[in-house]
Amino acid sequence: MPESYAENGRSLYVRKDTLSSLVDRLHSSEEVLNHVFNLTFSVVADDVIRATFLSHLGIHDEGPFTVIGREAGERYGWGKNANVAQQDGFFVSNASAVAIELKLKAPSSAAQIAKYAALLAWEEMVSGPKKELGLLFIVPEETVALHWTKCGLQGPTIDRRFLNRELELPRRIADLFAQQQEVVGSVLDRMRLAVISWATLRSQLIAIQGQLRIIEAGDQTLHRVLNGFIAQLDAHHDTGLDASRSWQPAVSGLHR
C-alpha cells in the first residue's frame, strides 16, 4: 500500500469478514429479502399474484397488473429520490390496487396502515378510483395472532375513524390526511385488510410449482424463479420458518 495513504505515522485498518459471516449477515437482512421479493413478483404472471395475494383479501381481479416500485416518487409527485412511503409490494390494475407489507423482527403498527392508505389514495388520484383496495401483511407465524392488536385494531377492519388517531407520520402523509380527508376516507371505507404468515406464502408457492408443466419453457422459468425465492425464505433467519420441517403444499387457487 502506498505510504501516502497513511501519512504522519497513521495506520489503516481493514475488517476482513469470513464468507460464512457475510452469508449469515445477508440471511439476516430485511433489505435482501425485500429485493428478492420485488424481483420475484415483478416477473411472475398475474395468476400467481391473484393466487398468493388477492385471494387472502377476497379481491377478484383478472388484471393485468402493474408493479409500482421505486418510480412511486415521480408517479405521485414526491420527487425522484423522495422516500415518503416506501412500499414493499404494490400491484395496480384498472379495477384494483393491492399493497403488501413484509414484516420480520419489527412489530406492525397503525402508522404502517396509514402509510398504505396514503399510497392507495395517491394512486387513485393519479389513475382514478378503483373498485377494490387491499393491504396484506406477511409476518412470522408467531406474530399472526396478535397482529391486529399491535396495529391498534380490533381485527381486520378499518373505517374513517382511523383518521382521528394521533400518529407520527411523514409530513407529506400528514398533509394528505389533512387536505384530502374525503379521498383518504373513501380509501379507508373500501380498504380490505388481511394477514398471512411466511409459512402460508411458502406453501402456496410450493403448490403453484406442483401445477406447472415443466416441459413448457415458460413454466420452467417460473419454477426456477419460485425456487430462488423459496430458497431465500428458507435461509432467512427471521421469517419464522423451520427449514427442517416437512412442508405440505396449500391449495393455491391457481388454474392453468
Image (cartoon, rainbow, N blue to C red):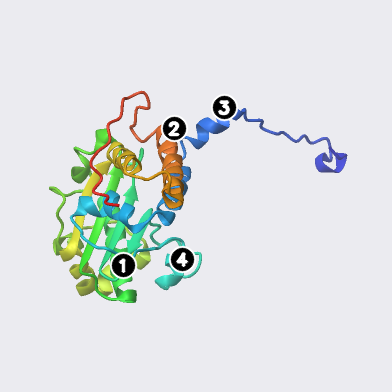
- Left or right of 50: which side holds 32? right
For marks 3 and 4, give the CA distance: 35 Å
Q: Amino acid at mark 3?
A: Ser
Between marks 2 and 4 in the image, the one whose residue lies nearer the viewer: 2
Which residue is label 3 attached to? 20
Give the mark nearer the N terminus: 3 vs 2: 3
- Left or right of 40: which side holds 115? left
Secondary structure type for disc 1 = loop
For marks 3 and 2, give the CA distance: 13 Å
Between marks 4 and 1 in the image, the one whose residue lies nearer the viewer: 1
Which residue is label 1 attached to? 93
Which residue is label 2 attached to? 235
Q: Is residue 5 above or below residue 16?
A: below
Circles 4 and 1, Cβ within 8 Å, touching? The answer is: no
For marks 1 and 2, give the CA distance: 33 Å
Q: Amino acid at mark 1?
A: Ser
Which residue is label 4 attached to? 71
Give the camera-side residue of 213 and 70: 213
Q: Is residue 91 above or below residue 204?
A: below
For marks 4 and 1, give the CA distance: 16 Å
Give the mark nearer the N terminus: 1 vs 3: 3
